[in-house]
Amino acid sequence: MKTRNVYLDNMPLEEALGIYEEKLRAAGAWRQLPGEFIPVDEARGRVTAEAVFARISSPHYHASAMDGFAVRAKDTFGASETNPLRLKVKEKAFPVDTGDPLPEGCDAVIMIENVAPVGDEIEIIAAAAPWQHIRAIGEDLVATEMIVPANHRLGPYDLGALLAGGITQVAVRRWPKVVVIPTGTELVQPGSELKPGDIVEYNSRVLGGLAEEWGAKVKRYDIVADDYDRIKKTLLAALAEADLVMINAGSSAGSEDFTSAIISELGEVVCHGVAIKPAKPTILGIAQGKPVIGVPGYPVSAALACELFVKPVLGAMQGLVLLARHTMAALLSRKVMSPPGGEEFMRVKLGRVGGEVIATPMSRGAGLITSLVRADGLVRIPRLVEGIEAGQEVEVELFRHSQEIANTTMVIGSHDITLDILANRLRLKHPERSMASAHVGSLGGLMALRRGEAHLAGIHLLDEATGEYNVPYLNRMLGNRPVVLVNLVLREQGLLVPKGNPKGIGGITDLVGKGIKYINRQRGAGTRLLLDYQLGQLGLSQEEIEGYDREEFTHMAVAAAVASGSADTGLGIYAAAQALGLDFIPVAQERYDLAIPGEFWDTPHIRDVLAILADDDFKQEVLALGGYDVSRMGEVIFSS
Amino acid sequence: MKTRNVYLDNMPLEEALGIYEEKLRAAGAWRQLPGEFIPVDEARGRVTAEAVFARISSPHYHASAMDGFAVRAKDTFGASETNPLRLKVKEKAFPVDTGDPLPEGCDAVIMIENVAPVGDEIEIIAAAAPWQHIRAIGEDLVATEMIVPANHRLGPYDLGALLAGGITQVAVRRWPKVVVIPTGTELVQPGSELKPGDIVEYNSRVLGGLAEEWGAKVKRYDIVADDYDRIKKTLLAALAEADLVMINAGSSAGSEDFTSAIISELGEVVCHGVAIKPAKPTILGIAQGKPVIGVPGYPVSAALACELFVKPVLGAMQGLVLLARHTMAALLSRKVMSPPGGEEFMRVKLGRVGGEVIATPMSRGAGLITSLVRADGLVRIPRLVEGIEAGQEVEVELFRHSQEIANTTMVIGSHDITLDILANRLRLKHPERSMASAHVGSLGGLMALRRGEAHLAGIHLLDEATGEYNVPYLNRMLGNRPVVLVNLVLREQGLLVPKGNPKGIGGITDLVGKGIKYINRQRGAGTRLLLDYQLGQLGLSQEEIEGYDREEFTHMAVAAAVASGSADTGLGIYAAAQALGLDFIPVAQERYDLAIPGEFWDTPHIRDVLAILADDDFKQEVLALGGYDVSRMGEVIFSS
């Protein structure tokens, strides 16, 4: 093969797909795989390699379609209620059950219900039409008729039709074989003891799992260190057995990124760098007549590159088009900007709240595998579009069935670990329901309610003027809109400190003037308001606190910062301290409530949640976390 | 368990589903199966039995998100273009690559691009913000955070997140075990030599395949003869190992239908007879705390009963709701009547022809497995509705992706075996395309074009007045509508007779007065018009022909009738004779054309078909069938 390296920094997606297909075709690597004969009984899910024609007819004989008597129609002509006719059994009328072959010479069946036995005769009061109640030979399938064409994925019904047509062996395309090669000196296998700098190698499992879902047989190779010769040797071994190879990663331009150079040496790099975000540094290559795809290292980039470039090739090999995801229209909840020059694939959460489906953009970081777990779909922002306005309709490529979206209860607001437990209980009790929560702080939750993005919001908002929780904010944020406030828990807030409290922090006053590095929550978070309230009560100012400006979005993130030593303390809940083995200096008990717009009160979204709040097992599970008081759980605190 | 037999002749579907679920719950048979720990690497597609919480954070250390230098942010304050700042490498600035752990004391990373090396120092012209370009500990996942709840089906992304969170073993629900018992003395295994009366046992493969698609592990038992004690013994064996048992069939009220009595003896029949069509004689039973479902014998009934009653139970066992099919709105092509008192499930073909999606009702016989292969979906006709008018919008539960429907070329009209070959070639060359054909005769095809139900029609219509093929009918049927007529084949029509021509038939004249039993084609079929034309030329009358009124809808059905001896001869094409080993008495060569409305001419539906007509391989394959002349294949005969 002629080697021609094209290092294209930013090739538009459609162009990259087009050129790659063209080059693969030229190299014989875009091809339908050959067939192999297998028993029909093992063929469910396989794809036919050739058309299948019936060997026998079904039925293969004229069969009675009823229990009754087979007759010659012309023997019955003239029978009527006024002129009953008698036929001698076993001479002119032959008893048959459903499925029995039609006796020689007969051409009709009379149902047993329409026959009166009289001695060794039957009496009928209506003539039989020729061919009535007969399943004629070939009614279902005629021998030589095509049952299914080539390139047809065989489902359960197809298996039945093949067997009915006398087919017991069928030619199906062999499975495409895919090898995934994880490369990187920093990678370690899952379950290893981790040192700082180690990265758990899970991408090959995600890539392999995707390829399997698209019909491939996958072999994951062992981790290969960043070494040109070792990677080259491994790729050669993979090419010897695979129909397609993915190398992950080594696809960007870093000093230890060898993938592109190795593919060039062994074959051709068709494209290195696609104008998409994420997954830009994807490498589309061909070696030894086989597709070799360099998949970027960040997990979201890896999954996207696999879907965009591996899926169509695997489809072609199977003689199928692997179908696109179902789509759904939704309204974007907030404005997003997108850098021009690249097509962006933005993860969104979908909520059917009230009548509209709202798409809420998620974090756009390529490093967050959890964002793919939690996303409901993708929105494409075209290459030359710089952004999408809030409220604009977008088309979402769905990760889930639209029915699941409709059955998802959206909880937006402050984070509390009891919401995870609640979500799990809901799913156990009602497998058809899901609870999705987004952690944007208490004020963010009320804003989400105002915009119609959530069914309920978890809030713990201390009003500085009155010292009262939550109710003053409802009026302020939701105006005259009817809303019900239900208590979830009373919980301890306190300062999280490393085990043993090495800096000897005793309370809020110690945050000032003692060289303590604090870590704060984001603006609008109830925990931040609590700090501000406490500072106000104590006459301290925010500026005096080192780290007041460093923000995290969840209790657990604050706890993690303290556990790692990057901060000395932060305000948070007891459960977070306990989960990461920190000590906890109590500061205040606060009321964490659920704010529920009146219009959702009488829906399954709320009813099913309230039922769990009344469940003793749930209360016990929450109490076991520590730091919670469930005495008011489920109580209606306020209703407007 | 208390045995209570309720023989309910005609229980409405919703009621049957409701009572069965209630009874199964009471018997502990509607339950989520227990969990088993398996490696995450083997867990794709499995369903979690409990919530999974992260054991470790991801990243588990503060990591550089860029290649560059790690610094203390406060060491960089004041740096600007007018006031560059220098930091000593390895004292104040530490080189890091992406993914490297942040050195002790550092809290920011400066990208390599923004740094100028100066001896053993670096020069910067901007201050670093604290925590810039750092992937903080727990950014993706914080230890103790819930990754997925219980009752969540694990996909490739989930596996990545579990491994990232330090999980290598996961508790998943064990597979539901299903046993399918085929019963019936008339049943034989596929591949057996068939005698009249034998029925090939394929239902258990269809039922088993469906259960597998819904997540079960399936065991098919051997065929059990119709014998009370044998079936009872077999059911007891099945109950000992299965979570759910299907017995097929023995569910109707015939003399050898033991299923209901046996379930009653071993447990309880909750319902026998559901108000649905097909599948009315379904039995919903419980024995030894397990669901036992008596599935009717006709294949379409069996598949429907399985879907309606087995699927929800298997879903519950897995802690899932097995989702309904996607649906699509379509316009019904013709009026259908439905007997009141039962909910009918009607199979339809869908065609997106022009702008509208048209649903064409298919045969409603419960015995046709091929109807399930060819159907695109189901339309439910509610219990108290007696019919649906032509043109009314219906909701179709889809067997295929909507994209496949859009890519299907609808061919309605006369049947010719070359259409099967054409459909197969189309699929091989364009795996994304399908061709669906309905055989309603030539006139039926033109009527379908007129109603906008088809992209093209196959016709061979001899005009009695002019002796000209097809063109006169276009004017008559389609008026001024632009249409193009393209030749597919010239083909021999002749009399099909048994091998050796035992009745010595020499031509059309022999059909009269010689005791020959003829089998005719349906009204509107070109082959019937040809017979009528020939009779007219010979001065013979239709009434003189015995069997003139017995109609079949395809050439192959006529051939099958002759092969089976139920008729002595019929008019048909050479290919049909050859396929069933019949002799062929030529009568005439006719022109079989494709009529294509002008509006579809320049669409892929037609372009891709015309390309195949120009393909020499296709011509050779047609010639090999015999009886065809391909000299005019693809020629435009007429265009208006």
Image (cartoon, coloured by chain):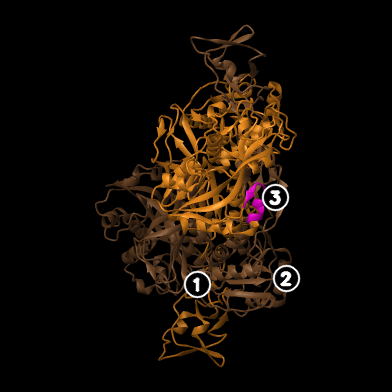
Chain colours: A brown, B orange
Neighbourhood count class around disc 3 (C-alpha, 10 Å): few under 14, some 14–19, many 20 upward: many
Which of pointers 2 and 3 indicates the residue nearer the eye? 3
Position of A5 relative to B368 (above/below): below
Residues indicated by labels 1 and 2 sit on the same polypeptide chain:
yes
User: Mark 2 is on which residue type?
Assistant: Leu
Residue B315, given in percent of the width and then of the height, sits at: 55, 41
Which label belongs to residue A236? Answer: 2
Which of pointers 3 and 1 indicates the residue nearer the eye? 3
Which label belongs to residue A171? Answer: 3
Helix, strand or loop at mark 3: strand
Helix, strand or loop at mark 1: loop
| Alpha carbons under labels 1 and 2: distance apart | 30 Å
| Alpha carbons under labels 3 and 1: distance apart | 39 Å
User: Mark 1 is on which residue type?
Assistant: Pro
Helix, strand or loop at mark 2: helix
Which quadrant, please, contains the N terminus of chain B?
Answer: top right
Residue, x 46% and y 28% (percent of image)? B342
Residue A581, given in percent of the width and then of the height, sits at: 54, 60
Q: Earlier in the sequence, mark 2 or mark 3?
A: 3
Instruction: Please provide the residue range marked out in magenta.
Output: B618-629
Position of A186 relative to B362 (above/below): below
Q: Earlier in the sequence, mark 3 or mark 1?
A: 1
Which label belongs to residue B219? Answer: none
Can see residue A296? Answer: no
| Alpha carbons under labels 2 and 3: distance apart | 30 Å
Q: Which residue is farthest top?
A: A119
Residue A39, given in percent of the width and then of the height, sits at: 72, 45
Which of pointers 1 and 2 indicates the residue nearer the eye? 1
Circle 1 residue: A12
Q: Earlier in the sequence, mark 1 or mark 2?
A: 1
